[in-house]
């Protein structure tokens, strides 16, 4: 299983946003592109992938590749899935998630809660590694590709000091994907390809 | 210079489409994601990149990284640039392009004309290579990374027989980026990273 945790710093926490202005809706466009980069292949879906979108301090949306339906490549239809999840946010209580659409769950977890969940699973698996993608990290090519990685990324803003502290405590590696700092969705596409081609020789 | 030629099979050739339904407008959403994948970095633009969108039999839009302004990461604003170029299509005559916005040019070239243009340049350069990205190609890792590659990709549909014949005649290599067939925009992000990290060792 590959997991991606995306921290959306300005992301909306209620569904009152317009599908006609996604950048103006707390950069929902960024979230949408990350979800599609994580799941979509040319002829199908990456079933063994999970995405967490962290929205504000205490809300997140989880997408499960195995169960996802109705995910299209365009931003607007993905934004409609996010809006649908936010419409169900009152149904999520404590650690009980609410499913708003097949494979889409809204939860009361913020970044800390999501990391706890991910690390809780990780403790029972030798193949898991929680990896923060950051510009100043070590080259990913130095990393032995983990079987079940959890990549933590930020949207178009930097991690806050509090988030950085949380990540420093709880993640295993800080890596970068190359010499250029990429948008989060492109980083996800590259990280997938890095794992897809693990074992390939290259120049 | 890195160039990407994207063939849009259903793409509109006139500006009469709605920004509220890009998938319904001949998959303009696909074109938009490819343009942003080709140019955008987290903190800037890839200036030494050129994109050709081939729309139908005899129209294309060329984006020049060096001159581009007003390119944002979201699909809708990129679609507005495409629509703006199509509004100027009557101004393009013969091989004279029309500039609709800084760095965005509409031209009367179809795929053959674009390949002729690209190969004409290539003939004067040793470092150019015209590379078709196809599922059945050889692994890109077998390729010595060219300094000035031209990648030719299709949108969400396969190349037609006529296009395949043209490409077989005029391109140097058929490569794939990994074992998974990717959407065109993700392929562009991966191809850039492959070139960005050329020389990096990896597992």
Image (tube, coloured by chain):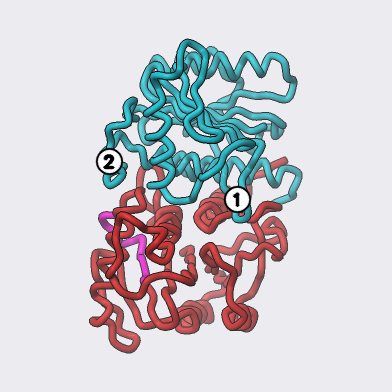
Chain colours: A red, B cyan
> Which residue: 52% across, 75% down?
A125
Magenta-highlighted residues: A61-70
Q: As drawn, is B55 to the left or to the right of A144? A: left
> Which residue: 48% across, 65% down?
A4
Residue at mark 1 to residue at mark 2: CA–CA distance = 28 Å
Pointer 2 indicates a residue of which chain? B
Q: Quadrant of the C terminus of chain A?
A: top right
How many other residues sit within 10 Å of disc 1, few (<14), some (14-19) or many (≥20)? some
> Which residue: 35% across, 49% down?
A74
* Residue linked to disc 1: B41
Check residue A69 for magenta coloring.
yes
Q: As drawn, is B62 to the left or to the right of A56? A: right
* Residue B18 appearing in the image: yes
Residue B181 rendering spot, x and y as whole percentages: 45, 41
> Which residue: 53% across, 62% down?
A156
Please tell me which residue lies in front, A19 or A36. A19
Residue A76 rendering spot, x and y as whole percentages: 32, 53
Please tell me which residue lies in front, B17 or A55. B17
Which label sits on residue B18? Answer: 2
């Amino acid at each position: 299983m590959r997991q991606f945790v995306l921290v959306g710093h300005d992301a909306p926490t209620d569904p009152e946003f317009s599908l006609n202005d996604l950048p103006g809706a707390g950069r929902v466009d960024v979230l949408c592109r990350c979800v599609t980069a994580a799941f979509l292949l040319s002829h199908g879906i990456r079933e063994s992938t999970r995405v967490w979108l962290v929205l504000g301090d205490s809300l997140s949306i989880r997408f499960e590749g195995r169960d996802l339906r109705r995910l299209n490549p365009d931003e607007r239809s993905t934004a409609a899935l996010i809006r649908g999840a936010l419409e169900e946010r009152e149904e999520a209580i404590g650690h009980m998630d609410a499913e708003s659409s097949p494979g889409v769950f809204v939860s009361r977890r913020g970044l800390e809660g999501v990391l706890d969940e991910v690390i809780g699973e990780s403790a029972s698996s030798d193949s898991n590694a929680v990896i923060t993608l950051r510009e100043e990290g070590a080259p990913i090519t130095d990393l032995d590709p983990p079987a079940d990685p959890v990549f933590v990324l930020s949207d178009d803003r930097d991690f806050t000091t509090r988030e950085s502290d949380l990540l420093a405590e709880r993640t295993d590696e800080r890596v970068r994907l190359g010499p250029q700092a990429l948008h989060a969705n492109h980083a996800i596409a590259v990280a997938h390809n890095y794992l897809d081609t693990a074992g390939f020789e290259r120049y």
